[in-house]
Image (tube, rainbow, N blue to C red):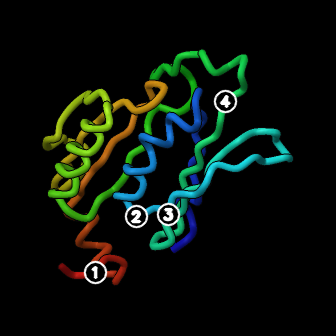
Amino acid sequence: MLLGSINHVSITVSDLAKAMAFFAPLLEFLGYTVGKIFHDDRTNHDLTVNINYANGTAVNVWQAEPELAHHPFQIYEPGLHHIAFNVERHEQVDALYDLVRGLGAVILDGPGEFPFGPGGYYAFYFRGPDNLKFEVVHMPLAQQRARAMGLVANR
């Protein structure tokens, strides 16, 4: 079960407190416990560790170096392209769409069906703080497999 799974994703933002005003409601909706901002003496940076205890993943958000904080994120430069979050139901895609739009996200595409997964791929794409790109997706076949393995409750 753990082999190959993602342990955590860390992103860097130009203004940590401002970014967390956006990320906290998004991550809470997705089942994460949002951590407090703290200072890491080892790296001399502020960050927050946000853990989804149900699936064992974390999304860490770090404060950028002051001299790098104004470098604009570009999707197609080397590095991170985007982060995609799974949800369990089609309706959760729509609910998160409403939530992030209300938080000021720039919607790039969707919600709608995309040709990226067998059995359906209902998603939307958006830009959050610092122009970082995110996706929220419901894949019915992935949901069915997880349910069959006892990883998702029957609803």
Q: Residue flagged by tag 3: what amino acid is it? A: Thr
Q: Is residue 149 above or below residue 8?
A: below
The label on residue 80 is none
Q: Secondary structure at mark 2?
A: loop
Who is closer to the viewer here, 11 or 4?
A: 11
Between marks 1 and 4, how big is the CA–CA gap? 39 Å
Q: Do residues under tags 1 and 3 come within 8 Å of each other at their CB atoms?
A: no
Q: Quadrant of the C terminus?
A: bottom left
Q: Earlier in the sequence, mark 1 or mark 3?
A: 3
Q: Residues within 10 Å of mark 4 (few under 14, many from 20)?
A: some
What is the spatial separation of the Cα atoms under label 3 and label 2, in whole angstroms?
7 Å
What is the secondary structure assignment of the residue under circle 4? loop
Q: Is residue 145 above or below residue 130?
A: below
Q: Which residue is mark 4?
A: 64
**Residue behind mark 3:** 33
| Marks 2 and 4 close (CB-CB < 8 Å) | no
Q: Quadrant of residue 119?
A: bottom left
Within 10 Å of the Cα at label 2, are there few (<14), some (14-19), or many (20+) other Cα atoms? some
Question: What is the spatial separation of the Cα atoms under label 1 and label 3, in whole angstroms?
Answer: 20 Å
The three-letter amino acid code for the residue at tag 1 is Ala
Q: Which residue is mark 1?
A: 153
Q: Nearer the viewer, mark 1 or mark 3?
A: 3
**Residue type at tag 4:** Ala
Q: Which residue is mark 2?
A: 31
Camera-near label (1 vs 4) is 4
Amino acid type at circle 2 is Gly
Calculate the distance from the C-alpha at mark 3 to the C-alpha at mark 4. Answer: 22 Å
Looking at the picture, tell me which residue is in the foreground, 1 or 53.
53
Q: Quadrant of residue 13?
A: top right
Marks 2/4: CA–CA distance: 26 Å
Give whichever of discs 1 and 2 has the lower sequence position: 2
